Amino acid sequence: MAALFKATSRIDEDRKRIVFKIAGHIDSNALIDSWIEVYAALAEPWAYDRLFDYRRAEGLVDFDAIIRLADWWHERLDGRTYTSNVAVVVNNSLDEVRVNTVAKLFPYDRREAFVTIHDAERWLEQSVTRKRA
């Protein structure tokens, strides 16, 4: 029996970071809806680095749902450019490869896949240090 789907988010204003945790059998549309809700509540969501934690998730996010998010995101950008870092903690090798495909939909993000939360957080902290330098 598949675990129930749950998506949560936490905004860390001090670090300008959004942490998304995904658990259970992925409901792609509900997941994208939850992300859009979080992003829509922020004046400039692209100003935040992001951490997506899929360690407790099952299944894959439908690519059509990701395209829906990309379309929404680019409409919201309204021609702006930005640079942000996106760390994705994956639990399978297919997701690790898909990170590169998704990265093409968000060309201003620097997106990397990780297998541990520790490595993802360390990479984001180093990225913040590089931004400030």
Image (cartoon, rainbow, N blue to C red):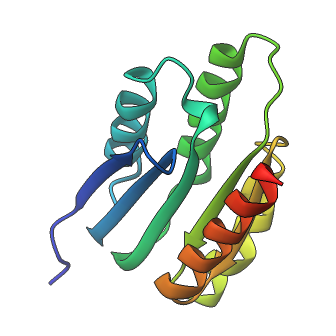
Q: Residue at x 39, y 48 (%)?
A: 12
| Image quadrant assignment for residue 56 | bottom left
Q: Measured from the top left, where is residue 60 in percent x and y?
A: 49, 68
Q: Measured from the top left, where is residue 25 in percent x and y?
A: 29, 70
| Image quadrant assignment for residue 27 | bottom left
Q: Taking the image as drawn, is residue 25 in sight?
A: no
Q: Measured from the top left, where is residue 38 in percent x and y?
A: 37, 33
Q: Measured from the top left, where is residue 128 in percent x and y?
A: 68, 58
Q: Residue at x 14, y 84 (%)?
A: 1
Q: Residue furthest front?
A: 133
In which quadrant of the rendered image does the C terminus lie? bottom right
| The one of 71 and 43 positioned closer to us in this rendering | 43
Q: Taking the image as drawn, is residue 120 in sight?
A: yes
Q: Name the side, left or right, on which 26 lies relative to 91.
A: left
Please, is residue 57 above or below residue 119 in the view?
Answer: above
Q: Residue at x 52, y 89 (%)?
A: 116
Q: Residue furthest top?
A: 78
Q: Residue at x 80, y 17 (%)?
A: 80
Q: Name the side, left or right, on which 46 lies relative to 127.
A: left
| The one of 83 and 126 positioned closer to us in this rendering | 126
Please, is residue 58 above or below residue 76 in the view?
Answer: below
| Image quadrant assignment for residue 22 | bottom left
Please, is residue 19 above or below residue 123 in the view?
Answer: above
Q: Name the side, left or right, on which 117 lies relative to 46.
A: left
| The one of 74 and 128 positioned closer to us in this rendering | 128
Question: What is the count of numbered marks?
Answer: 0
